[in-house]
Every structure is written in C-alpha cells, then in structure tokens.
Amino acid sequence: MEPQNDTKILEFLLLGLSEEQELQPLIFGLFLSMYLITVFGNLFIILAVNSDPHLHTPMYFFLSNLSFVDICFTSTTIPKMLQNIRTQSKVLTYEGCITQMYFFILFAVLDMFLLTVMAYDRFVAICHPLHYMVIMNPRLCSLLVLVSWMMSALNSLLQSVMVLRLSFCTDLEIPHFFCEINQLIQLACSDMFLNEIVMYFAAAILGGGSFTGILYSYSKIVSSIQRISSAQGKCKAFSTCASHLSVVSLFYCTCLGVYFSSAATHSSHSSATASVMYTVATPMLNPFIYSLRNKDIKRALERIIRKAGITLSWG
C-alpha cells in the first residue's frame, strides 16, 4: 500500500535535547535565560541605533536589521521548545512544523545575507573612504536589505514546498528541539532525492556565495590596510571591522562545527546539542560583541540607561 500523507491528523514529536526528566528544569531555565538575554540585548542595540542621530549611518542601519533578524531567528524555535518542556508535551502539528521550518530557514539565510552586506559596507568604508557616503547611500542600503529579504523568502518558500510534496510514515519522531529540515526529510517514506538535491544546491549557492563574498571583501580590506603607512592608521582601520569579523567568525565557525560534529558522530542528539551554538548562542552573543567593542554603541546605551534612570527617579 502507498504511504499516505494525511496532513489532517499528522503530528510530529520533538524529542528535544534530552529525554531525561530530571534535566528538563535545568534546560528550561538555561534556554529561558538565553532567550531573554538575546531578545533584550538585541532590542537595546535597535533602540540605541534609532535613538542616537550619530548612529544613523549605513553600518548601524545594517546592524539594527541584524539585531531584529536575530530576535526573530531565536523566536521561531525557543518559545515552542520552552512550551513543550513546561507542558511536558512533545507534539507539534504538521502545519506548525512546516511553518516553523519556513521561518527558521528564512531568518537563518537572512542572517547570512546581512553579514555579507555588512562585509561589503566595511569594504567600501576602508577601501573607498572618500566615496563611502556616495556609494552607501540610503537608497542602496534599503535595496540591499530588501533584496536579502526577498531572496531569503523565496529560498525558504522553495524548501517548504519541496517538503510539502513528501509522504510521511508512522515514525514521526524528530530528534531535535525544532523542525530541522534535514531531520524532517529523513522521516519521509517517499523519494527524497530531489529534496536533498535542492537543499544542498541552495546551501552551496547561498551559503557558499555569501561566504565567498565575505572572504573577498576582507581580502580587499586586509590588502588596503597593509598599504597604510602608520601603525595608528592600521589599528584604526582594523577596529572599524573588528566587531563584524568577530560575529562572522562566530556564526560560520559554529555552523561548520555543527556540520562536522554531526558528520563525525552520526548522532542526531549530538547534532541537536551542537546546533544550539548557532541557533541560540550566536544571536545572544552578537549584542555583547558589538556593544563591548564599539564605543559609539556603548555611549548610546549609557545615554539610554541614564535617561531611564532619570525617568524612574521622577516617577
């Protein structure tokens, strides 16, 4: 008999990071703390950029967009995971799984595109400083963000439509804390060859293209910095892209770490644990990297805190 894909009754079970009951309160507390730090940390970055006229520049425009995407990125997975732990339920409906997968892919790819756009921004700032504001005009900045959104949305829609054509068997346990596309495809009874081709081709084109763009930008940046005669000038030029380079390194190193660890261990639970690094840890650390290494952001945040303190004292 042909396997049927009955979406009306189909439900998936998210096994999470661990099935040991005694660890659930610890996992709940840890992920709730990380989620709150991520949301409020990135909200502070957005607030600082929007409230300070000195930060109304292309670099901080892209940074505020990245912070918004990081909030959305973690919000696609963590709240559902926390709800499952609190209610002691692992069930996720078919529609809910597809929706979660769509938005997870959307914001993950958008993260990559924004990091690439920010690398291009730093390339123009360092290699063409006299023409920076002419090249990185508000129209181009908005267009770069809009194109990133459109490409991410189209890729996510394609991946979701490809999953919708699959039929699933009775074993619907996903050894992860969210509907990860690779784990989802492995549960299919129907032929998944085309899905794997599309998935890996998109990863190679979008991920590889973004990474290549970042490498090209930084190769030009390094070459330009080396031509600066004074050591102080070199240090100042490098400091303008140090925060972004740290975030890029964190994002791509954790992604590669997850890929190689899952390939080495062949364990789904190990892969799920490793994926916490780029799904939760990276968005949480981004605000700290930009605020601790950036004097402008520091000053803007200090002004916001002082204003809030004055308001509270008057209240």
Image (spheres, grey):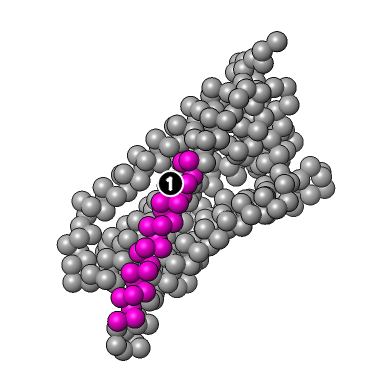
Which region of the structure is painted magenta?
Answer: 201-227
| 303 left or right, relative to 88 | left
- Nearer to me, 217 or 234: 217
Q: Quadrant of residue 13?
A: top right
Residue 209 picture location, percent across and down:
41, 51
Residue at 44 percent of width and 59 percent of height: 44
Give the number of marks: 1
**Vertical comparison of 233 with 6: above or below:** below
- Asked if the magenta segment contains residue 30, the reply would be no
Image check: 50 left or right of 66? left
Majority secondary structure of the magenta segment? helix
Q: Nearer the viewer, residue 178 or 46?
A: 178
Judged from the image, the secondary structure of the residue bearing numbered disc 1 is helix
Disc 1: CA contacts within 10 A as few (<14), some (14-19) or many (>=20): some
- Which quadrant would the N terminus be assigned to in this image? top right
- Write the residue at 28% across / 60% down: 58
Residue 204 is a magenta residue: yes
Q: Which amino acid does label 1 sit on?
A: Leu
Front one among 85 and 143: 143
Left or right: where does residue 109 sit relative to residue 9? left
Report the residue at 45% width, 31% height from top. Answer: 158
Whole-percent x and y of residue 108?
Answer: 49, 46
Residue at x 20% of width, y 60% of height: 135
Residue 138: x and y in percent read 22, 54
Q: Name the residue under label 1.
A: 206
Residue 98 visible in the displayed image: no
Q: Can residue 283 be spotted in the picture? A: yes
Q: Residue 166 appears in which quarter of the rendering?
A: top right
